[in-house]
Every structure is written in structure tokens, then in C-alpha cells.
Amino acid sequence: MDVQSTRKTPDPVVRVEHLAKRFRRRDGSTVHAIDDVSFEVHAGDFVVLLGPSGCGKTTLLRSIAGLETPDQGTISFGDRVQFCARRDINVPPERRGISMVFQSYALWPHMTAFRNVSYPLESRRSGRKHKPTIASRVREALELVGIPELEQQYAAQMSGGQQQRVALARALVSNDSLVLFDEPLSNVDAKVREQLRIELLALQRELGFAAIFVTHDQSEAMQLGSRIAVLQEGRVAQLASPLDVYTKPASRYVAKFIGTMNEVFGRVTAIKAETAVVDTVLGELTGRIGAESVAVGDRVAAMWRPESATVSTSDPVAANRLRGELKASLFVGTHTEQVVHVDGRDVHVLVPGADVLGSGSDVWVEVSDVDMLVLPAEDA
Ligand SMILES: Nc1ncnc2c1ncn2[C@@H]1O[C@H](COP(=O)(O)OP(=O)(O)OP(=O)(O)O)[C@@H](O)[C@H]1O
Ligand SMILES: [Mg+2]
């Protein structure tokens, strides 16, 4: 046996197995905040937990941090079990060796930036002998997040963006291999948020920590994530790269949550290999069968992205053709957003650059069968 095959693959930075957490509401009802969740985070991974309000993002993150006690399941970091309901293991948060950044910054307002950042180092080590190292590491962290000049400034006297940089420095200063983020950028304005996203990614690459980042903002998830976990009522609906989540959504829920989708419901009348023919109110549509299998007779949604469609005035060639009237053409610089009225419904089309067609034109909306996605209609 060669050396290669006997070498043990490294443990993931985080392994979550069959995690569940229920809360009892005051009216006596039970909420399944986390419902049988399993996933792994590897070294250098940037996993984004994405989902609507109340889907369990914060509960999952707080459970990993040790701030919440799940009812079932296991959480391990590397080869160390941090939580196991069955074996009654629950390592307290301060001994899990991770850092966390909160939406609310959670800084001490009457402490300077320096003191806010040095605090976790001082509380983890004892005595004075480390003081010089602490000071240089704090300065290095403030330098990293681009605010060395604010070292002696009180947190209460800083802008939101500056405070969030201090919070970031405080999370990075311990040099932990895992950093957790709970919507850290939602309190800063759009420009600063954009800037901080770029810097955060650069810092993560430079320092090499694994990140779990909670957001309900889908474009933030697409920009930051090496993988995105789309959560739905406490469950992982899909965990995949941003590209796969966007182009191969596992369900209608995921497809609708990420980006914009046109959709029309109908029944499957025929299946040929990977393609389904769907009878809809807009006529027959042919599309690629999505991640879940569908059968003849099933009620499904035929879905397509605005940027996958084109608009033409004559001789349609694509597998799917919809006749309609161009209602609006909105030029926004990089592209033009078009709305076509098809049989009483608005169909959205996005074309690059400026559009030459005038409103009121009779047009064809065209979508190829590869860009048309057929997914189970679920509860719709
Ligand atoms: N301490 C608690 N007691 C009772 N119910 C709770 C508690 N904490 C959370 N929940 C419930 O658990 C569910 C998940 O909450 P959680 O805070 O994890 O959602 P979230 O995805 O972070 O939402 P948001 O985007 O609004 O922050 C919600 O229905 C919430 O009401
Ligand atoms: Mg939350």
C-alpha cells in the first residue's frame, strides 16, 4: 500500500451532525429553530448561512459558538467534540477557541479601540509578561482593518463603519482558525458595506481562517461565500457554491430566494431524458429538469432568469417562445430592464447595454430549453 492511500484526510474545521434546537413559545407552541442540520466547514472555507428572517441562522451560529445549547446532535472542531447531546458534552464558549462578530458590534463604548481589541487576548492569558506581545498584536490587527490612527479613540466616538472595523480587529487578533459572523455589515451604509466585504475577503485569504457568515442578503452571500447554505425553516435546503445555487437550485424555494425568477405553473406532459415538456397557461414550455425528479402529470413550475431571456421582433428560434407586448424598457446604464406583457402577466427580461425597441412593440420573448428550469411546484 502506498503512502498516499494510508494518509488520513484532515478533519474539517467544523463538523455539525444532526443538530436540532427547539424553542417553546410563550403561547405553548414549539418552534423548530434548527431541524436536523448537518454540514462541514473546511480550512479556508467561507460558508454563508442565508435565509429569510426567522429561518434559524442566528440559532445555528450561536449553537456553534456555544452560546445556545441544542437539543440533539454533535458539533466538533477538528478532532475535538464541542457538543454532543447524547454524551452530555458541552464545552463553554470561552474554551471553544473561536471568535465572533455581531451585527451590533458589541464594543465597550467607554473603552478605546486599543482596549476593545486587546481584551480577548488579556482574558485568555494571565499576567503582565505578555503585555508587549499583546500591544504589538493589537496594533497589527488595527492596521489590518485599516484604522491604526483610531487606536486611542473611544468606541462611542466612532462611526458605525469604524466601530465594525474595531469589532473585526477584535475577532482577528486571537488568530483563531474559525471566525463566526452574524450579519456584521447590516448596520453600516451601502458604500462602507461594499468596501468592508472586499476587505473581509482579502483578510480571510491572507490569514487563512475558516468563516461562517450569517446574512439574509443574497447578493452579499453570492459575493462572500465559497459555499452558500440556504436555510428554510431550520433545515438546509441547499449547500453549494454560489454558481451552483444560482444555476442549479435544488428547489423552487432556493430558486426564488436567490436572484429574480420568472415562473409559470403547469403540468408535465412528456419527459425526454433530462428535459420535461410542461403545459402552462402561456402554452407549451420545454425545460431542463432541476435537481429534484419530476414525473408526467406532476404539477411543476417552469422558471427562467431575466438575463437568460432575449427579446426579438421577428422569427423566434429558441425552444420557448412567448408572444407579448413590450410594456417598459428601463435603461439603467449597464443594462436595460424590460417588462413584456404576455397573456396578462409581466415577464421580466434583462439585456446588456441599451435597448433599441420602443414601448408598445409586439415582441417575442425567447428562452432556450437549457435556461428553462422545471422544478416541483411544492406548496404553490
Ligand atoms: N430564545 C428564544 N425563545 C423562543 N423562540 C426563539 C428564541 N430564539 C429564537 N427563537 C425562534 O427561533 C426561530 C429562529 O430564530 P433565529 O433568531 O435563529 O432566526 P434568524 O434566521 O437569525 O432570523 P433574523 O434574520 O431575523 O435574525 C424564530 O422563529 C425565533 O422566533
Ligand atoms: Mg438572526
Image (cartoon, rainbow, N blue to C red):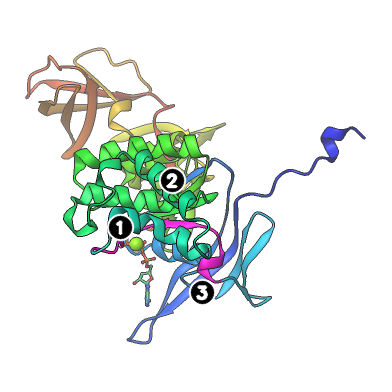
- Residue at horizontal 53 percent and vertical 62 percent from the top: 125
- Residue at horizontal 63 percent and vertical 49 percent from the top: 12
Residue 110 x, y percent position in the rendering: 23, 64
Q: Based on the displayed image, in which of its 4 quarters is residue 380 positioned?
A: bottom left
Q: Amino acid at mark 1?
A: Gln
The mark nearer the N terminus, 3 or 2, is 3
Quarter that holds the N terminus: top right
Observer-side mark, 1 or 3, equals: 1
Residue matched to label 3 = 69
- In this rendering, is residue 125 above or below 25? above
Q: Amino acid at mark 2?
A: Ser
Q: Quadrant of ligand 1?
A: bottom left
- Look at the image and tell me whether residue 12 can be seen: yes
Q: Residues within 10 Å of mark 2 (few under 14, many from 20)?
A: few
> Is disc 1's CB within 8 Å of ligand 2?
yes
Element marked by disc 3: loop
Observer-side mark, 3 or 2, equals: 2
Residue matched to label 2 = 136
- In this rendering, is residue 55 above or below 187? below
Residue span colored magenta: 92-109
- Residue at horizontal 29 percent and vertical 16 percent from the top: 316
